Amino acid sequence: MDTEQNDPRKIIFSFLSELPQTIQTEALLFVIIYAIGVDLPNDTKEFPGVVRDYLIRLGIPAIGAVICTAAVIDHIFEGQIPRLDSAEAALKLLTDRDPKNLAFQQSHLSLPLRRRHWEQAFEKWNALRATKLAPQNLRAFADNHLIPHVRRSE
């Protein structure tokens, strides 16, 4: 049986829950869109509950949720920094063209902090993927959930 601290469902949810607010909603949004595939809640405050309910399942659905969510997070990080580079260049052009537009200015000014948060989260995710969420640990989790548990009568 998985212990609390080795349960990949809880490790992944904890990782997502501890992301800085500057990037958390975006990360949860990607998980909801790519992994869960449900209609988006109207309130972003509901995102964590949707992801938690998806991850904290039992049996075979738990295996799929873990594998899919880990793959989505891998995918997010794969191209996030290059996307931020493109966004920064585009926002710089927009800000230069319309210096009075506060939305462009705020977005452009927030990018360095968001980039730092994504980079730190990527480092933490890579550490988890090398240890607690390594392929062999995900296989052990899957094996544990594929084996029918026999209840003993007392």
Image (cartoon, rainbow, N blue to C red):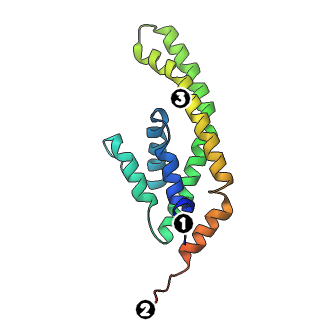
Q: Which residue is mark 1?
A: 3
Tell me the element at label 1.
loop
Q: In which quadrant is the C terminus drawn?
A: bottom left
Dot in front, 1 or 3:
1
Q: Position of residue 136 (x, y in %)?
A: 68, 64
Q: What residue would you read off at disc 3?
A: 114
Q: Quadrant of the N terminus?
A: bottom right
The CA span between labels 1 and 3 is 33 Å
Residue named by callout 2: 153
The earlier-in-sequence mark between 2 and 3 is 3
Which sits in the foreground, 39 or 45? 45
Residue 94: give x, y in percent of width and height. Answer: 50, 14
The amino acid on which the numbered mark 1 sits, given as a three-letter code, is: Thr
Q: Which residue: 54% across, 14% down? A: 93
**Mark 2 vs mark 3, CA separation in Å:** 55 Å
Mark 1 or 3 closer to N-term?
1
> How many marks are shown on the rendered structure?
3
Residue 40: % across, % down:
36, 46
> Dot 3: few (<14), some (14–19), or many (≥20) neighbours within 10 Å?
some
Q: Would you identify the image quadrant in which residue 83 lies?
A: top right
Of all residues shown, which one is farthest toward the bottom? 153
Neighbours of disc 1 within 10 Å: few (<14), some (14-19), many (20+): few
Q: Work out whether 9 lies above or below 58.
A: above
Choose between 104 and 59: the one closer to the eye: 59
